Image (spheres, grey):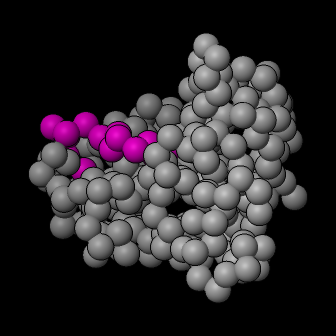
Amino acid sequence: MDSIVIENISKKYGDQFVLNDVSLSIQQGELFGLLGVNGAGKTTLIHILCGLKNPSSGAITMLGRDGLKELNKIKPDLALSPQETAIAPNLTVRENLAFMARLHGLSKHQADEKVNEMIHIFSFQPYVKQKSKTLSGGWQRKLSIAMALLSEPKILFLDEPTLGLDVLSRRELWQLIEKLKSHMTIILTTHYLEEAEALCDRICIMKDGKIKATGTVDELNKRANETQFEEAFIKFVTEEEL
């Protein structure tokens, strides 16, 4: 069953296409990767799906509803962890989680239960009273994702979740994302090839606002006649036709 269907979505600023006739489908429970260099259109597509930007043309279906006309009915089931870590730097870990839980309309009792659940899942116990601005980059990213999960979304958007993290922090976050993938549909944007290869069920390679190829790593390697995903990716983004 498809969780998201995108049909001929374009986004223009003046005469410049940021997205150009993008069509794809994402299955329920899938971890779907949008892979490409900076400026490929990944974040713009995520923002359109979340309702932060309007497309210039095209149609979207999400969770069986019109993703443009019925967005307000869909939004409670969507969550975004953006590139910029969305935390309040002067609040503690617990205070950040509690504040977001109350914003989602949870009662104090419900919020306390949900906050404690996130603290357990993300192993925040040593940091609950620590101001978030003093956390490492990896722990700040984990907190941002935990805050996005408080609403129990059916679709989670992770926009460059490991951007700027060191290798160890990136690997730890990968393990966390792996645990989440069976509970919801996840759309992950990245420009790290190894991240897409390690985490994603399917990958959409984008360049200059267009889709160059979509499939599993094995399918993409086979289509490019390569055994290494890095070589396949390079072919897709450098050759006009493949």
- Give me the residue at 42% from left, 35% from top: 102
Given residues 89 and 56, the one toward you in this image is 56
Given residues 203 and 125, the one toward you in this image is 203
The total number of labels drawn is 0
Is 34 rendered above or below residue 201? Answer: above
Q: Is residue 153 magenta?
A: no
In the image, farthest residue toward the top: 14
Per the rendered image, the range of residues in magenta is 80-93
Along the horizontal axis of the image, is 168 left or right of 74? left
- Give me the residue at 78% from left, 73% from top: 223
Is 58 rendered above or below residue 118? Answer: above
Percent position (x, y) of residue 99? 34, 36
- Give me the residue at 56% from left, 44% from top: 40
> Does residue 200 appear in the picture of this structure?
no
Given residues 204 and 201, the one toward you in this image is 204
- Give me the residue at 33% from left, 44% from top: 85
Is 214 rendered above or below residue 52? Answer: below
- Quarter where residue 55 is shown: top right
Percent position (x, y) of residue 89? 19, 39
Along the horizontal axis of the image, is 98 left or right of 126? right
Along the horizontal axis of the image, is 158 left or right of 97? right
- The quarter in which the C terminus is drawn is bottom right
Percent position (x, y) of residue 175? 44, 75
- The quarter in which the N terminus is drawn is bottom right
Q: Main secondary structure of the magenta part?
A: loop
